[in-house]
Amino acid sequence: MTTAPDAAAPLRVAVVGARRTHQGTGPFLALQAAAAGAAVCAVWGTSSESAEEASRWLSERGLDSPGFADWNRLLVQARPEALIVAGPRDTHAAWLETGLRARLHVLCEKPLTARRDPAELARDFAAAGRVLRENCQWPFTLDAFLNMHPGFSLERASRFRMRMTPAHSGRDRWMELLSHPLSLLQAAAPGPVELEGVRFHDAGRLSFRWRTHNCELDCQVDAVPSDEYPRPAEYRFDQALLRRRIEQPGYRFAFEDQAGRVQPGADPMALSVADFLGRVALARARCAAPLDEDLVRRQELFDRILAAWPA
């Protein structure tokens, strides 16, 4: 007989993709989960060497998490309750199914690609009482945006512009970045959405119209290659700008407006991780997890936009 987890105990989290690479978020997600109160009980790698490398990198930063290359052994010895999926994009679908079979709460790095209908997958997680989230951090910058632009009404905005600097090219570029503007728009103009006029003007520019029950936004997303790191990114509603600034050393976040005024801010990815842990805490307390309607709608919007990519 298995016993129910103690709802007051720290959530036991395993991380897939925690080895430090140039673009990988996995090790930082592990550190952020621990900082938010989770017990990062294991990291998984494709080999014993990569698992040990990930574990060693985290240990040097004060986080002792054993490495595993055998999933079944990880489940038995580490006893995770949640899984952070931060491996390569083409592994996400398999890990989502693996997490569901193991009845784990899952935070998946972008994009949330599935082998089947994402709505069906999300319903299966909800039916199992497990939280499924996509790691979308840009909605967590909206508080900073509104603090920088007091009195600004998102409901009265008519234009949205976002500029990002992805590492990839062609359709892969949009696979990697589309969740950013879509999740931000969902937070700013929530509810069911009608998309109109979806068009890729070239490999680096996308436009569409976003219409909800009380909002209509003319949207444009620019993907501009850059060798700068951390990668520049910004968005505007009408003329009100929020530009991300990351100051080194220490990877300190700040935000800048169109007049050049700068204010410090929290790392939105850390806020996304903390939000996931908070949702899991509620699910554990209630023994139920509601269906994430935004996640389901976002996957439908994602697929519809990519369908407009020129053959």
Image: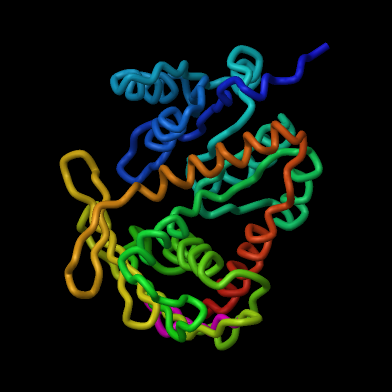
Write down the quadrant of residue 58 in the picture.
top left
Say which of 148 and 135 sits in front.
Answer: 148
| Image quarter of the N terminus | top right
Please indicate whether residue 94 sits to the left or right of residue 234 in the image.
right
Segment tinted magenta in the rendering: 200-211
Q: Position of residue 142 (x, y in %)?
A: 42, 62
Q: Is any atom of residue 203 visible in this view?
A: no
Confirm whether residue 249 shows in the render. yes
119, 3: nearer the viewer: 3
Quadrant including the C terminus = bottom right
In the image, residue 125 lies at what x, y percent?
A: 74, 43
Magenta: main secondary structure equals strand
Is 125 inside the magenta-drawn segment? no
Coordinates of residue 82 in the picture (x, y in percent): 61, 31
In front here: 199 or 255? 255
Q: Is residue 199 left or right of residue 224?
A: right
